[in-house]
Amino acid sequence: MPFREDLKPYRLLALEEEILGRWTEEKTFEATLERRKDAPRWIFYEGPPTANGRPGVHHVLARTVKDFACRLKTMQGRYVERRAGWDTHGLPVEIEAERRLGLEGKQAIEELGIARFNEECRTSVFRYLEDWNALTRRMGYWVDLDNAYITCDRDYVETLWWILAQFHERGLLFRGHKVLPYCPRCSTPLSSHEVGQGFKDVQDPSVTARFALEDGDGALLVWTTTPWTLPANVAVAVHPLVDYVQVEVREGETAGELVWLAKDRLSTLKVAYEVKKTVRGEELVGKRYRRLIDWYPVDESAPAFTVLPADFVTMEDGTGFVHMAPAYGQDDYDLGRRVGLPVLHPVDGTGCFRPGSPVEGVFVKDADKVVLRILKEEGKVWEHEVVEHSYPHCWRCDSPLLYYARDSWYLKTTDFKTQMIAHNESVHWFPESVGSGRFGQWLEGNVDWAISRDRYWGTPLPIWICDDARCATQHAVGSMAELERRAGKPVEDPHRPFVDELTWACAREGCSGTMRRTPEVADAWFDSGAMPFAQWHYPFENKEKVESELPCDFISEAVDQTRGWFYTLLAVSTMLKGKPAYRTCVSLDLILDGSGKKMSKSRGDVIDPFEMIDKYGADVVRWHLLVRPLGTPLRYEEHDLVEIRNRFFGTLLNVYAFFATYANIDGYTGDDEVPLRERPVFDRWLISRLHGLFRDVAKDVDRYDTAHAGQRIADFVVEDLSNWYVRRNRRRFFRAELTQDKRSAYQTLHAALLSTAQLAAPFIPFVTDTLYRSLAGGLAGAEPSVHMAAWPQADESLIDASLEEGMAALRRVVSLGHASRDAAGVRVRQPLARLSVWGLDDATAAFVAANQDIVLDELNVKTLDLLDEPSADFALEAALDKKEAARRLGAKTPAVAKALAALDSRAVCEMLVTGTPVVDTEGGGRIELKPSDVRVSVSCAKGWAGECAGGLVVTLYVRLTPELELEGLAREVLRQLQRTRKDMDLKVEDRVHVRWYAEGAAGEALAAWSEWIAKELLAVSFERVDSADGLSPVKIPGGHVIYVEITVS
RNA sequence: GGGCGCAUAGCUCAGUCGGCUAGAGCGCCGCCCUGAUAAGGCGGAGGUCCGUGGUUCGAGUCCACGUGCGCCCA
């Protein structure tokens, strides 16, 4: 079966479409699973995206990484079940539905009806499902889309209910308060995302009030920019570790008054004073003060109205005493919860004060003035001014937002903090810093998870509460069946408003209340965090499967999921099962635009992944995303894709095309077997490099270091395989007969291409499968697809370090030879007589000597001299290579460097020859160095050109003889004739007849080298004629012209 | 305001345990090679390694402070 000859770089896109068709037709994905069905499992969790927007490149990144890992593990012999998932609930979905329905705010939603609204959510959440599916398929992400889990499905919701009921039973799900930004006009809390859009600079009153201490020892000065919150004050906070002072006023109306403030804030006092006492903040803790404003009743027993310690107190502004109103600030609220402060909340849902006070019915922002006026009248204001600061406003209606404590359900995650931290330490994070840094630090500051949302489209909290306030019995429903039994009705839809209508009589003795559902829905992060369980309808089904598969082996998402999915997965599994949820987490950084900014629709710099894939192909896009540090942000530049395509994909396919062309001419099939030890050294070298590659890439991918792994593969293909092996061995393929040497070459190149395809298959599944199918197609034991094959494993016995060292030295010689030619200005086509090399150690010298043909041919020289002794044709200078030496030399380094630089050439050579360089330093005595400590540069005698590096000196004798000049001209002629052949579009194997005519040196060269030229041209006849009549002129560089006629044989 | 991270050539980035000739690829310029190549080879121009201070014989690297940027959170 001949090898395909249509795998060309410019056909990449067509080839991808073709192999996609094959995968569908042959059900290749299913086949790879089937092949591994009895293998040990490798568990992968898919983080569910929301399909209510078009997918972007960042989604391609996450999907590429997941696909890479799953394909790799499959090839490495594991069974990797891959179930897709869709996230369906949550505020973003609701906002999109509001927009589509033209609604503004919750009131409008409720007027329309929750049923209609949720119906819109349910349909619009899959609005772009087709795009997602198309992208997934086109980019080659193998995942089971047909059987995807969907977070709003009845079974999924049932598991969520079961989990919540478990938590409720264990006392881990409870009602509390949460301080939220709230728009009083729209009567709704805003998400942090919405708040972020509406910051404005505004002027607000700031007031410093006197809080008189009950013990009569002066007053605390307390500063606030929200005077309206003062009626809700229940405590004052100090920083326990900073100094506070009591000062006596020395001037003005209040002379003699005692006030307290932080020592660091003394500079803000505008009156003359005398410091009376200095104490640490902690010494003030517990002191009681008189209520500033007592308009609303509250439990006044301690710790209310006392001084409390708090770390969040700063010395940036204010007085160092912070007024605590737990209803209106998160810090205040959290502190209050810890120490048991009452929550005083005298404001109603429209932002107006409740009855029973001088500010009754007044909107809070307007109450600032009233509160100030009354405090002034009562002599409680120390100072009053206006400050400008940035304050959040509602993005819809521009009202200033208020921070309100609202009823909220919590999961008691703080009880599991230690356990979550321990679990986190068991996770392999890539990059490591995310786990120990961002995530670890954040877990340390864990607060209870506020899990409820006052919204509509979400998993309804399955908590029913007795509506008789005296009873208020709570009951959590753990299954659909239970709900149906209690309510006596079928559960048609586990969403609002249907479940809201299901009620039953309170079962408590003597209570005549009705059990009604609490109106909130769950945070959508809970939905996805519970996916290990809910995706399999645990525990109603798949009980053992779910338990045995937890924790999974691998997850990967963008780093913005740290506090999202990465956290909720961990929290749910820790609370429910006492286990972590994942063993490995690959956290991906963002994709930025070319100027390093986050892509934004408004700037119009959003990259469309479909466009990129249509233009460059999915493999190129995947390689670009994968072969770079995953944990750093990517600046997306299109020209990077061009480079990848040209350099890596172009080279790989062209090496293949070269192989296929000649293999097909020779009828080589790939099942030949020349034993490795009988193959030429070049072949053994390539095989050694190949296995070294397997070994190194395996180490990289174990750490999910796709950057280094991919770089190694590309370097192998471009440098070792193409630029060295194929370039230097081309002629072996050109020979007419199929000798053992030629068979070795085919076999070696075939093996390298085939296993490179296998190695790279998880990265670039399309082109590698195409290559594999062509290369392996005729072999016994071949798989139908590369993705069913095994991932290559290194055979250490085939790695020959000394052979690789020898070849590396040889390549250094060649490189220095090229540099020497360049320095002398002699083109490579001009043969030269001699190349001298000095400075190789015995082993590499022997290798180079044995393989001198490679050097001679590559550099087009006649003889190679490997010198034992330095020649008089070059001179050396020495310098210290500090990198190695300095660690041993320490402070002597500069003196040694100076001494070394002063050595003459003879001394340098001697030093290198003896192998133990010794220098006399000023003041430092004789110092012994290693050969590798010394760096040498070279200058050459006349007639020679040379370069040196790494202790190696290469010199080239550049004087020409007439014979050499004639040969150079002959090569020039051949080159032009080969070009003519190519211009005629002849096939490489076509035989030709040549008639030629030339005068002068060109004629001489042609005549002298005619046999060789004829052979190279595949000329079956090569006839000199007497005139140029009927022949075409061909220009030869150097001013010559020859005349030829080439005809196909 | 807090946490994490980043800052090196025109661009994208390496730079390990501290070692003054600071690298690679792309782009640019010159030369060379080419019957697999959308390639390749040799060289050149291009650097206040963000700033300041410190540790050290020696700092792109370690420490401190500052500046700018990104992300997350408040």
Image: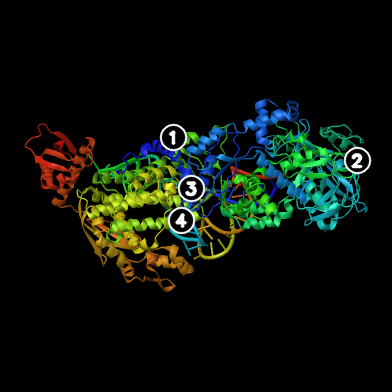
Estimate the spatial distance between the alpha carbons at disc 3 and disc 4, rounded to whole Å.
25 Å
Q: Nearer the viewer, residue A987 or A647?
A: A987
- The chain under label 4 reads A
Look at mark 1 in the image and give the residue it sits on.
Answer: A615
Secondary element under disc 2, as helix, strand or loop, is: loop
Alpha carbon separation for disc pair 2 and 1: 69 Å
Real-space Cα separation, disc 2 to disc 3, in angstroms: 71 Å
Cβ atoms under marks 3 and 1 closer than 8 Å: no
Q: Which residue is mark 4?
A: A698
Q: Residues within 10 Å of mark 2 (few under 14, many from 20)?
A: some
Residues indicated by labels 4 and 1 sit on the same polypeptide chain: yes
Task: Assign the C terminus of chain A to one quadrant of the image.
Answer: top left
Distance in Å between CA atoms under marks 3 and 1: 34 Å
Q: Earlier in the sequence, mark 2 or mark 3?
A: 3
Which residue type does callout 3 highlight? Glu
Amino acid type of the residue tagged 4 in the rendering: Ala
How far apart in space, not on screen, are marks 4 and 1 (Cα)?
A: 31 Å
Q: Amino acid at mark 1?
A: Lys
The colour scheme is rainbow
